[in-house]
Amino acid sequence: MKGRNWVVLIVVACGLLILVKVLFGDKDSKENLPSEKDDGIVIGFSLSSIVIDRWQRDRDVFVATAKELGAEVIVQTANEDKETQIKQIEYLMKEGVDVLVINPDDKDGLSDVVRRAKAQGIKVIAYDRSISNADVDVYVSFDNQKLGRLMGETMLEYVPTGNYVIINGSLKDNNSIMYNVGFHEAIDEAVENKDITIIKEVWGEDWGEEIAYTSMEEVIQSGEKVDGVIAANDRFAEAAIRVLAENRQAGDVVVIGHDAELSACQRIVEGTQKATIYKSITDMAEGAARLAIDLANGKEINFQSTYDDGTYEVPRIMYDVFIVTNDNMVDIIVNKGFHRLEDIYQNVPKEQWPK
């Protein structure tokens, strides 16, 4: 009888032990198992803004590529505010990211936080826009001076003589400065020869389109004839064209923008915008994701040139740019899968679509 009691007690004890494990788990074994985050590479992707379509494309391609390669990406968007971006970068640092990929809102405003990140051993990539005096590990962008030069050369082809308006981007974005250098490389000789007169040149604060609209409105109201508008992006081009349309001049003035936004491609085939610039965002975003993982793994990086950030010579990787007009829209935009033919030509009679 006593033996049977011992058996019952043992069975009960085992049952209680099993119940405890089911309810509370094996604490030691769970704590010792590494999580996926501990095992894998974690990338912090800090974007100034995703208001413009192209930045959404950058984000989506970058995240998809990194995930496909086994990395985790934490995305933060600063809504074009420097202080917000600094706080978000600090948050990413606390999260223990291995690499920071930063598209800065203000080229001069992130030097301190980047240096602090590097002091923690975090690798830093400046994405599309440079960061001043920060000694980032790599700067990845397009050939922005060539971009501006292509826009200026194309404008000269269409308007070899006449009055130009130039609407530049934000001075907080070094790309804007490089575009402007390119514009003037192309057109300054014609200006010196008095073939071209720049009747207005402005800089847009924080890339706000209001500057494009108000500047064009001022020129039109002044009564001065406008022959060509070089706009630092397609949003600026759109704002300028809106003023021209309100004054029945849309299509009569040559307008060139950049970013190859869908709306810009539509305006080109419809005749109100003459050209835009295509940049292979997919190539750059994929390349940057692979680069981030290589940096995290300690691999040596092959770069094409260096860039002076004001204090340091920073390795730079540049991607090419292409002018887009009605003549090469299909070859450059449709065939590369950037926009669909039916979306670009949706407002054009179907019998006029390219075959």
Image: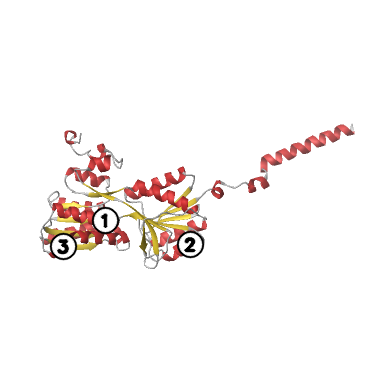
Residue that badge 1 annotates: 146
184 shown above or below 72: below
Q: Nearer the viewer, residue 79 or 31?
A: 31
Asked whether residue 106 is in view, the answer is no
User: Residue 189 shows which numbered tag?
Assistant: 3
User: Residue 118 shows which numbered tag?
Assistant: 2
Label 1 vs 3, first from the N-terminus:
1
Q: Amino acid at mark 1?
A: Lys
Q: Tell me the SS state at disc 1.
A: helix
Question: Residue 321: x percent and y percent?
Answer: 28, 50
User: Residue 300 shows which numbered tag?
Assistant: none
Q: Amino acid at mark 2?
A: Lys
Q: How is the image coloured?
A: secondary structure
Spatial separation of the CA atoms under disc 1 and disc 2: 31 Å
Residue drawn at (45%, 60%) of the image: 87
Label 2 vs 3, first from the N-terminus:
2
Residue drawn at (27%, 43%) of the image: 333
Q: Amino acid at mark 3?
A: Glu
